[in-house]
Image (cartoon, rainbow, N blue to C red):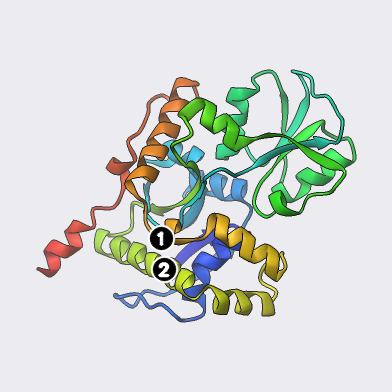
Amino acid sequence: MISVAHSPDADDIFMYYAIAFGWVDSKLGLQFCNTALDIQTLNEAALQGSYDVSAISFGVYPLIAQDYALLRTGVSFGSGYGPKLIKLKGKQLKPHCKVALSGAHTTNALLFRIAYPNAKIVYKNFLDIESAVLNGEVDAGVLIHESILTFSDQLEVEREIWDIWCELAGDELPLPLGGMALRRSIPLLRAIDIESTLTKAVQIATQNKPLLSTMLLNRNLIRVNAKELETYLNLYANADSISLSPVQKQAIDTLFSLLHKAGFYPKALCCEEFLLPREYAELRDS
């Protein structure tokens, strides 16, 4: 049984559930089980090697690269949008303001720390950040996932993480937010089959978006309504999520380079070097 961990937000569930509903089969007959956890818990679990396959923040990958291969599928990027730094309307943020972030290894948190080096940071489950800002526990917080669509009208956006990304990397590259990683101890042919199965799941999901969305809504598997789900999937679970493109790889490498220069990691990685060698299976079958 292959253990797959993903977040409980709509795009991760959407991209996985073609497998759970039996729409996609593994070529090798592998069986899958899934677990839904918040993104920082997933990042920490990946650091411990807890799951065979896990959704992760791209920001954590350099810390797990020796133990996990980076998969090409199930990726989420922002393009003109992404996490939002929010505050109470009219509030002025000071350089040493207290800010809630969704986890130490999330991509948005690392980019925020580069842009706001003097902020006092607390880490919270992403579902608790809006209320922490509303009740005054923190001065501001970075919203992620579906929260960017539905936050209180008492709040306003101070800054988009997308804008920070553009200042650091240039506005021609998408913002790398999350992807999937696979344990390196899994035999290579099996690993390639897992990636292929997950890729087919994302492809089938995007091709059958209305039907799959209805099934997820009817089973109360997601936290948003139909209109919000459509909007959110258009942002984060779409044709660009099926398989990494050259531009997306360039964006990931740019992120790794920025985080290295900021002192978060000892060296910058090239993501191409950490992908599964799919040609191995092709040579075996030839």
Under circle 1, the secondary element is loop
Seen from the viewer's position, the closer of residues 253 and 174 is 174
Rendering coords of residue 137 (x, y %): 86, 35
Seen from the viewer's position, the closer of residues 159 and 41 is 159
Kind of residue indicated by mark 1: Ile
Q: Is residue 139 left or right of residue 75?
A: right
Rendering coords of residue 237 (x, y %): 52, 60
Kindly identify which residue carries mark 1.
Answer: 242
Residue 224 in view in this figure: yes
Up the image or down, 30 lies above or below 90; here it is: below
Instruction: Look at the numbered discs 2 and 1 and tell me whether their residues touch, using CB distance below 8 Å.
Output: yes
* Picture residue at 79% right of the left edge, 24% below the top: 93
Q: Is residue 79 left or right of residue 221?
A: left
Seen from the viewer's position, the closer of residues 276 and 85 is 85
* Picture residue at 45% right of the left edge, 57% below the top: 241
Kindly identify which residue carries mark 2.
Answer: 203
Q: Which mark is residue 173?
A: none
Q: CA distance from mark 2 to mark 1?
A: 6 Å
Location of residue 211 by image quarter: bottom right
Up the image or down, 194 lies above or below 38; here it is: below
Rendering coords of residue 12 (x, y %): 55, 61
Kind of residue indicated by mark 2: Gln
Location of residue 274 by image quarter: top left
Label 2 CA crowd tier, 10 Å (few <14, some 14–19, many 20+):
many
Screen quadrant of the C terminus: bottom left
* Picture residue at 47% right of the left edge, 64% below the top: 3
Screen quadrant of the N terminus: bottom left
